[in-house]
Image (cartoon, rainbow, N blue to C red):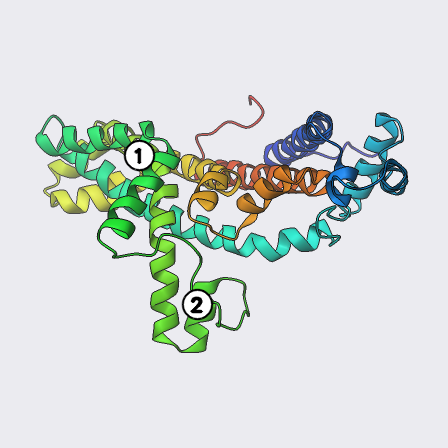
Amino acid sequence: MEPPIEVSPLARFVLKRIGSILLSLWGVSVLVFLMVQLIPGNPARAMLGERATEEAVRELEHTLGLDRPLIVQYAAFLSRAVRLDLGRSIKTNESVIREIWSRFPATLELTLVAMAFAVTAGILVGAVAATQRGRLLDYAGMAAALVGVSIPIYCLGLLLILVLSSGLGILPSGGRGDASVTVVSGFLLIDSALSGSWGAIRSSLAHLLLPAVALGTVPLAIISRITRSSLLEVLDQDYIRTVRAAGLPERTVLLKYALKNALIPVLTVVGLEFGYLLGGAVMTETIFSWPGLGRWLVTSVAARDMPAIQGGVLFVAVLFMGITFVVDILYVVIDPRVRLGGE
């Protein structure tokens, strides 16, 4: 008799996480399908216009399968989704997958710049606050973090437009940049650099700054607070006292020994916030007329475009869960103190 195959704790953890993700995605698909059904109005009439005859509306409903029972419609939707076929947009008659991929680079570019701003500034503010514990810089940094968490994105976005765009005229209030740049990667900043035009690069950067700051403010505040509390905990450890007793400079103690270990919990926060930004850029893209996935979803809801709404939300859910899965794996690999599966 062959001995049973032993599965490592990491493999068991990965399999459990994949199973929970698949179950969660199924739940998301059910919720999205049912919620879209509750949107008032008839998608077929919205597509044909208010002057369309009842006969034409019923014929289009039959063509789209909207006259079939909900369970049959859901089964057809789930079957297509498993095959990466999210249907065709009622509004544009284009493939939903193609619509998503054409707009996703703009959302990803904005999210990456916003996250880079949040991580850099958040770690810096948190580290300064921790090293200046109980002093003016500590209180100022944490007060700023509290304001950053509390202020809604739409308020901050409108304030930035009012002050820096309408008032001072320093930065543009909307759009993405130079439309004449040849699209290669889908990231306008990279494509502008590839074009060799400094004017296009400046235009791309200028259009990115305001929405990136508005989108990155909340994760900046969260990262700074997590960094501060984690660094304070590490600085109280015995090995830090030993390193200090050895006579090493405080900067070396902070950068080489303390900050490295303090950033382990920050990794989880960064991954989760990155996922939230990708899925939550709707308000920012709408305020700054950014042609990304979030703004497309808003217009799809306004047009009662059921396939676009279902496909877009499902895509964002897959993206968010994929990011959290990668973060969980990295956290387990980086921090050996984490116990897998309760072992």
Q: Amino acid at mark 1?
A: Ala
Distance CA(mark 2)–CA(mark 1): 32 Å
Q: Which mark is residue 342?
A: none
Q: Give x and y (percent) for residue 147.
A: 26, 29
Q: Give x and y (percent) for residue 291.
A: 52, 53
In the displayed structure, would residue 108 be above or below residue 222? below
Q: Pick the residue in front: 171 or 118.
A: 171
**Left or right: 57 with respect to 246?**
right
- Which residue occupies 88% across, 26% down? 69
| Quadrant in the picture for residue 119 | top left
Which residue reaches farthest front? 51
Q: Give x and y (percent) for residue 216.
A: 36, 42
**Left or right: 307 with respect to 159?**
right
Q: Give x and y (percent) for residue 215.
A: 39, 42
Among numbered discs 2 and 1, the one appearing first in the sequence: 2
Q: Amino acid at mark 2?
A: Asp
Disc 1 on helix, strand or loop? helix
Q: Pick the residue in front: 55 or 278.
A: 55
**Left or right: 58 with respect to 134?**
right
* Label 2 close to label 1 by CB (< 8 Å): no
Identify the residue position indicated by label 2 in the image.
178
| Quadrant in the picture for residue 193 | bottom left
Q: Do we see residue 1 in this rendering?
A: no
In the displayed structure, would residue 68 be above or below residue 216? above
Which residue reaches farthest bottom? 196
Q: Pick the residue in front: 139 or 289.
A: 289
Identify the residue position indicated by label 1 in the image.
221
- Which residue occupies 9% across, 42% down? 247
Q: Pick the residue in front: 328 or 341.
A: 328
